[in-house]
Amino acid sequence: MKKKKKKKKVKKIFTGMYRAAVNAERAQSGYGADPSTPWLEDAIPLNAALIRAEPKIMGIIESLFPAIFEFIKHDDRIKKPNTASGRARIKYTCKVVLFNLYLAYLVGSPIRYARDTGQYAKARRYGQLFFKYHRVIPVIAAFEDLGLIHHRCGRYDREKSMGRQARMWASEKLVAMFNKVTQGYPHQVFSEDPEEPVVLKNEDKKKIDYIDTPATILIRNNLDHYNDFISDNEVAVASNGDREISLYNLKSKVFLNLLKGNGTITDLVFNNEVLKSCIDVNNKTSSNNKYKDMIVDIYNILYINSNIYKIYNNKYISITHKNFKPIQVDEFINSKEKVYISCDRLIPSPCVARNYLIGLNNNVRLDDFELPFIPMQHRDISRSSKYLKLLSYIINHNILNLNIGDKLFPDEALLRQLFTKKASLRDFDIERLNFVVNDKKLHRVFNEESFDQGGRFYGGLYQFVPKGFRKDILIGGEPTVELDYAAHHIRIPYHQEGIDYREDPYLALTNDPEERSIFKKLLFAALNAVTEEEAIGAFRSKCIDIAWKTNLSLANESILGLLDRAKEVHHRIAGYIHSGKGRELQNLDSKITEAILMRMTDKGIPCLPVHDSYIVPRQFENELREAMVDEYQAILKFEPVIG
């Protein structure tokens, strides 16, 4: 009997992101998340390096820790919790869990984490920025026991050979604490720099230990030399309203990195009239016309700080969907801002975020919680937090107002089209977005348990922002230029074979610009794959976002046809395609990058690498071009083609 082929489950990334926007709206209005399956699937991983936050968030731990520690003292999995070191480690773990929960709350996503002891083993070389199983599980249990989180257990489906890690997310109680302490303004959380910048991974992509050699010591010293230099140079991004970006990239690549402290917004100019039109708390349905002209300060639209104004209850107003009925006003706190409150709870009408009903949470009273005293110097809202709040609102407002028609549950294919469609920042009501890059230090990752495999440079925020935004990078306030090695991944194999191939390898396959980009993705995936099956899967995942635009078939037979065509045209390097040599080619280009960075650093010229391209102040374009030619020729013996 023929065995039935298992159907691969498709992860609904964009459905999860849509639900995340709904849940962010719920959380910011004081409600808990709606844990639908797609939302749970689109979880962010627990980040052990997330160990710092702004003072207001740090203060919550001081308030919660006594109760958490009391619970943990009776957990047999933690040895000697009462010692000074034991207590400090428990508190450290509590901080990281809380900061992860806060970050996830801000983006409206759950956190996934492992409950398997094997997932917590880690080589000592990489420092202490990791959890130990016997501490993290009891700490999470304490959070759950105190009603601070909601939780879903992990599972393993033996029939499908597929597992899912456990999920957790902030409860209404913890959300209320976040909202009260921060006044509803996002505050950044920060990751520590890796203690070991030279990383070696095995075939399962797990970090492993290694014995230092003169070669690894030189790699580390070169990284330290570069990182010390680049840290003293200001790198910023200054984009105007014409810059194009997809909604997906605006949230996942820009906003999330800003929340994580990898960058800080210095200027955000928005379409004020458009935003104000979305903030409608006017009493249009009430017979009491006294309050029909109520307005809300754009920078203080959700929360009122009771610590300052001595009000019995914090009140909040959800503005995204105009979901609250008129308020019976007993007093107002600031006649200039005209933010009115009532001594009783707001009376809601149903808030429908694209047909997902959001009801008022009647179980949480913010004054039921003891919260830390916030020193006066930390009560003011920073400009960065105000900008983050506005950007968060703009993103969620655009997500929740996507044109999904009358569908109660928008399907993944439609959401994929809407999320990945590029539009100008101005279309998202943003006239200017400027931010400084905080995360500039680099580390290198080697693969397959060998320093001859991989070795690429990672870490700078500028590597993760959309390509168009790289044109807006300023170094020391100066405009920049980006040069790259044209068709780098295809040309290196030719040069390895002693062939000076100088044509465009993608136009050799097609004259159609759209097809050119498809073949570029195909050859990149194929050269980095070990097997034909892996090449097909990698290409499919890279092209799923553009398949609907180009009528590209992602069936196995169609992809195999494209591969055969590539092998036929580039028959002289066909032996490199899905051969497992991709990591060796990456190692060569990483050596070229290292040489370029050292040369530019020694000359005092800041240079930002993005794999096979490099960014420098415009005045140093000639120096960069010369370095790229020289270092390429030194390793591969041919002159490169520079784009």
Image: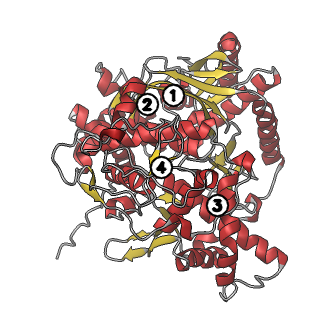
Q: Which residue is mark 2?
A: 572
At 78% from the left edge and 26% from the top edge, which residue is drawn? 601
Give neighbour class at mark 3: few <14, some 14-19, many 20+ (Cα, 10 Å): some
Q: Amino acid at mark 3?
A: Ala
Q: Amino acid at mark 2?
A: Arg
Marks 2,1: beta carbons within 8 A: yes
Query: Mark 3 or mark 2: which comes first in sequence?
Result: 3
Q: Nearer the viewer, residue 276 or 219?
A: 276
User: SS of the residue at dot 3?
Assistant: loop
User: SS of the residue at dot 1?
Assistant: helix
What label does residue 642 carry, if any? none
Query: Mark 1 or mark 4: which comes first in sequence?
Result: 4
Q: Amino acid at mark 4?
A: Glu
Tell me the distance, in whole angstroms, between the alpha carbons under discs 2 and 4: 80 Å
- The answer to whether residue 193 is above or below residue 609 is below
Measured as percent of width and height from the top left, residue 439 is found at 67, 39
Q: Which residue is mark 1?
A: 494
Residue 580 in view:
yes
Tell me the distance, in whole angstroms, between the alpha carbons under discs 3 and 4: 45 Å
Q: Amino acid at mark 1?
A: Tyr
Q: Which residue is mark 4?
A: 331
Quadrant location of the N terminus in the rendered image: bottom left
Q: Nearer the viewer, residue 514 or 191?
A: 191
Depth check, mark 3 against mark 2: the one in front is 3
Tell me the distance, in whole angstroms, between the alpha carbons under discs 1 and 4: 76 Å
User: SS of the residue at dot 4?
Assistant: strand
Measured as percent of width and height from the top left, residue 526 is found at 42, 41
Q: Which residue is mark 3?
A: 48
Tell me the distance, in whole angstroms, between the alpha carbons under discs 3 and 1: 42 Å
Measured as percent of width and height from the top left, residue 463 is found at 57, 35
